[in-house]
Image: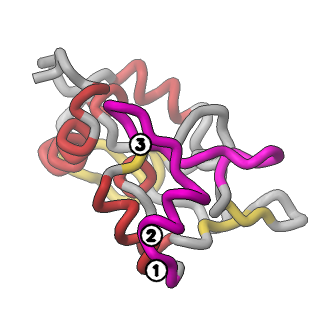
């Protein structure tokens, strides 16, 4: 395992910021995420999955709408926005920016700070806590982190 970047990090989501949500890429989800999101939206799991989920043999991810990165991203006219399923957002979204590839390398963390205004803001978060949050990603998406243990 890589050496942690420091003994602590700083992060605090900035009000109205959606920069992490409005970037190119996919939102990977777990079976539990599917159940929680379907329930939150008042849908059956099969109906939710038919409308919002792309499934392969190893992965689940949210389908991407044509003009947005996520069906649940709500943009404001001023450029900000919010997540319409915030209370049940997927592991990937909930744990950002405490992903293994970010917390384990200071240079990668600092590069991510150029994209996320909340990185290096707010209260100190001990590296142990950050690594614990990052371990949720490894558990949720083991196919993405095969060599990090």
Secondary structure under tag 2 reads helix
Residue wearing tag 1: 40
Location of residue 11 with respect to 109 vertically, above or below: below
Residue lying at 46% horizontally and 80% vertically, measured from the top left: 40
Q: Residues within 10 Å of mark 1 (few under 14, many from 20)?
A: few
Q: Contact, CB < 8 Å: mark 2 with mark 1?
A: yes
Q: Looking at the picture, how far across and down is residue 74, in whole percent?
A: 72, 65
User: For this view, does 79 lie left or right of residue 101?
Assistant: right
- Inter-mark Cα distance, 1 to 3: 18 Å
Residue 66, image quadrant = top right
Depth order, front residue of 13/69: 69
The disc, 1 or 3, on the residue closer to the chain's N-terminal end is 1
Residue wearing tag 3: 60
- Inter-mark Cα distance, 2 to 1: 5 Å
Secondary structure under tag 3 reads strand
Q: Is residue 100 visible?
A: yes
Q: Is 147 one of the magenta-colored residues?
A: no
Q: Looking at the picture, how far across and down is residue 17, in whole percent?
A: 65, 58
User: For this view, does 78 lie left or right of residue 120?
Assistant: right
Residue lying at 51% horizontally and 31% vertically, measured from the top left: 112
Q: Is 56 one of the magenta-colored residues?
A: yes
Extent of the magenta region: 42-70
Q: Residues within 10 Å of mark 2 (few under 14, many from 20)?
A: many
Residue lying at 24% horizontally and 25% vertically, measured from the top left: 145
Residue wearing tag 2: 37
């Amino acid at each position: 395992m890589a050496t942690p970047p420091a003994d602590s990090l700083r992060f605090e989501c900035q009000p109205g910021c959606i920069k992490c949500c409005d970037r190119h890429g996919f939102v990977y989800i777990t079976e539990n995420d599917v159940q929680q999101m379907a329930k939150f939206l008042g849908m059956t799991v099969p109906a939710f999955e038919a409308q919002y989920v792309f499934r392969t043999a190893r992965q689940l991810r949210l389908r991407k709408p044509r003009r947005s990165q996520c069906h649940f991203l709500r943009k404001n006219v001023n450029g900000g926005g919010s997540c319409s399923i915030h209370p049940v957002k997927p592991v990937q979204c909930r744990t950002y920016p405490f992903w293994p590839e970010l917390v384990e390398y200071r240079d990668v963390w600092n590069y991510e700070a150029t994209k996320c205004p909340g990185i290096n803001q707010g209260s100190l978060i001990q590296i142990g806590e950050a690594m614990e949050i990052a371990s949720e990603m490894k558990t949720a998406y083991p196919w993405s982190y095969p060599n990090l243990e």
